[in-house]
Amino acid sequence: MYFGVPVWPIEWDAPYDNAIRKIAAMGFKGVELIGWSDKWLREYYTRDTIRDLRNLMADLGVRMTNFNHTPERLSDPDEQVRQATKDTYKRAVEVAYELGAKTFTSVSPYPFSMCEAYEPLHHLPLSEEWTIHADDLDLDFDANYERYIEDMKDFCEWNRQAGLKALIEPHPYRWVHSAASMLRLIEHVGADNLGFNLDPSHLFSAGEFPQRTIYELRGRVWHAHFSDNDTFTNVHWRPGQGKVDWRAVLKALRDTGFDGEISFELEDVPGAGVPGKPCTARMEYELQESVRYITYLGDELGIQFE
């Protein structure tokens, strides 16, 4: 196992050269990149930019481990919207391959891609009623899921052709939000390169114990985002600042033979980067404290980090 950092809590927006330099300067070995939209994938990740990013990472001695892109409208009932979403995903796979990534992570869509129907979970503590803001939920969920399965078969094949593993990151209320929903997806898709990006903060807020999820998905957890939370608001705090049992999580990873990247995705700590504003100096403290805490627990468990 080794430690890395995604670029977006450092600098949310491209270009990502400075974010990569900051990550390397803090001593991390892994870097995750992201393609937020079709526009970013086609206009930022040009052939020249990809070459320059690869050269920069090689010069700094950091690994390009994981690429992120979420096909948000994949379950949209509008066939044209769905096809455009698939076309963008295909471009994202090309970018991931050209960057030298080993894994490609996506969040699954909401059923029917009803993004606007779900409030952000940080509203939950102050909400008198917590509901889905949709006029009618009497819809054909089976057909929508079956179409998602067929699209995921295509996605896994595209990733296979590029030598990539296709990972799903769980998020509350989406098609994949738990161990059971991931196992269902694996069973229906039937692709051996379909795996899981472990994200305890999202699992926790979906009612899962992340340590149990690791055992349930033994052999399919190929990348990990580490951040903590309070069990219900889906925030991304520094490990040790919330309620996740990190000792149990690390033990489960050790027991199941995980040897990939632990990427500290600290989106909601003081000083984190946000759209239009890069991180502050506080971010280095938050990341170094994360490393210190996880390394301490790893030492107790006999885990050697690179």
Image: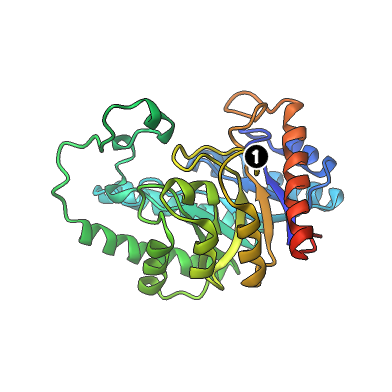
Q: How is the image coloured?
A: rainbow
Query: In the figure, 239 relative to 246: above or below?
Result: above
Q: Position of residue 305 (x, y in %)?
A: 79, 60
Query: In the figure, 154 relative to 68: above or below?
Result: below
Q: Is residue 158 visible?
A: yes
200 to the left or right of 140: right
Specify the quadrant of the image occupied by residue 185.
bottom left
**Location of mark 1 (residue):** 238
Q: Residue at x 58, y 43 (%)?
A: 228
Q: Secondary structure at mark 1?
A: loop
Of residues 188 and 77, which is closer to you in this image? Answer: 188
Of residues 191 and 163, which is closer to you in this image? Answer: 191
Of residues 290 and 6, which is closer to you in this image? Answer: 290
Q: Position of residue 202 (x, y in %)?
A: 48, 47
**Looking at the image, how many numbered discs can be counted on the residues?**
1
287 to the left or right of 164: right
Specify the quadrant of the image occupied by residue 285.
top right
Q: Residue at x 79, y 59 (%)?
A: 299
Query: In the figure, 160 relative to 245: above or below?
Result: below
Q: Quadrant of the N terminus?
A: bottom right
Residue density around tag 1, few if under 14, some if 14–19, many if 20 or more, within 10 Å: many
56 to the left or right of 177: right
Query: In the figure, 144 relative to 187: above or below?
Result: above
Specify the quadrant of the image occupied by residue 103.
bottom right
Q: Position of residue 244 (x, y in %)?
A: 57, 48
Query: In the rendered structure, which amino acid carries the disc numbered 1?
Result: Arg
